[in-house]
Amino acid sequence: MRVTQISPYTAYPPQTGGEHRVHGLMCGKPGSDNVVRFAKGALSQKYSRDGDIVEINENYQEYRYRHFLESLCSTAIKSTEDVANVFTNEVLSVTRPQKLNELLEDSDVVLVEHPWQFPYVSANTPSDTPVVYSSHNFELSMYRDLIDSWMRPLILKQVARLERLAVIESDLVISTTERDARLMQDQWNTDTPFHVAPNGTSVKSNNIECSTAPDFDGDLKAIFIGNEHQPNVRAVEQICRIAPTGKNIDFLIVGTVCNSLTDTPPNVHLLGFVEDLEEVYAMADVGLNPIVSGGGSNVKMVEYLSYGLPVITTAFGARGLPVEDGIHCFIRDIETFQSAVNEILEGELPVVQVSENAQEIVEEQLNWESISNDVFIRLHKLVESTSSETSSASR
């Protein structure tokens, strides 16, 4: 089976949550299948005129493409990459990349990550080739919470148009949670079939060690990892609010979310982008997930669980994941987050058993190999059923 995956950003090696999902859904492909990801490069990335090809493994490639019009579009609307992605389809309609058209013509199935490029892809894919919309969030809901500018009405109108088209006109929708699937079905009144593929991670060892001595004085180190995405920024603001009441606790903030922060309490340390996250996980005692907005399910939550960290999370932060309070993590509202951290410091919560349960559920349900394998089984069935319908119609 030849799969073309369309992504609004490069995803290998994965670093952000979205990149982990784009790559993770393909990482468990059968050896006989061929996957090519057509990925739009970031604003800062430069590629050759014909694009760059990265060989990930056998029969799995990432083709990286960028056109100067995308940079002009982003500059013109003075937007972040998130907002610029919403207008990617218009750029595609002008640039019409030859490589993309060749891939669409030669595919058995096309997988479109996010709805931003769906109209162009759908219009240029042969009618007998199934097109799958791979959603990361219920986008309309997320962008209502994300956008706060004079462009908000225009952006929300564009988001609604693209998401509705992707859900209604695709042959299959892949969603991260049952909740998102229900929201999209209700919002767009569709009978398009859905497949739920939760966010996952690779199975980690809890025997990692930190090779450098951390320069922190606290008796307990709590981490938060995230990119510069508004739900993450708000989560760190909550951490900064509760940090001064911490009892000898260091709060370590990792990732590009640090770019949005300036004035922080003395025990909140902004580590920024870290090349080797295992070093951070090795020094951490607890993972924090005070997320109260956004869509899909939370990749960082699964990463915390996979490393065997006891996790304190909001109920919203644990959405869509098969976890229970006191069994796999500790679910608290924002106002009681600090007391939960203190309880871990004082040894008042069963962190050892919870950590073991967390790693067990990752091994059984939340690892990319099994999630991706289920996706490919579903894609094979879709291709087979489409081929059968085409054959019947031609008789």
Image (spheres, rainbow, N blue to C red):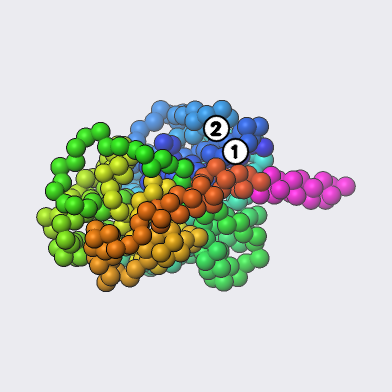
- Identify the magenta region: 378-395
Res 282 quadrant in image:
top left
- The kind of secondary structure the magenta stretch mainly shows is helix
Secondary structure of residue under mark 1: loop
Q: Residue drawn at (39%, 46%), measured in percent from left and top?
A: 307
Density class for disc 2 (Cα within 10 Å; few <14, some 14-19, many ≥20) is: some
Question: In 3D space, how far apart are the residues under numbered discs 2 and 1 (Cα atoms)?
Answer: 9 Å
* Label 1 sits on residue: 29
Give the image location of residue 328, x and y in percent: 43, 58
Give whichever of discs 2 and 1 has the lower sequence position. 1
Q: Any magenta on residue 389?
A: yes
Secondary structure of residue under mark 2: strand
Any mark on residue 60, and which?
A: 2
Residue 150 is left or right of residue 201, and the answer is left
Q: Is residue 230 visible?
A: no
Residue 328 is left or right of residue 393, and the answer is left
Q: Any magenta on residue 221?
A: no
In front of the other: 137 or 25: 25
Give the image location of residue 316, x and y in percent: 40, 66
Any mark on residue 282, and which?
A: none
The kind of residue on which mark 2 rests is: Tyr
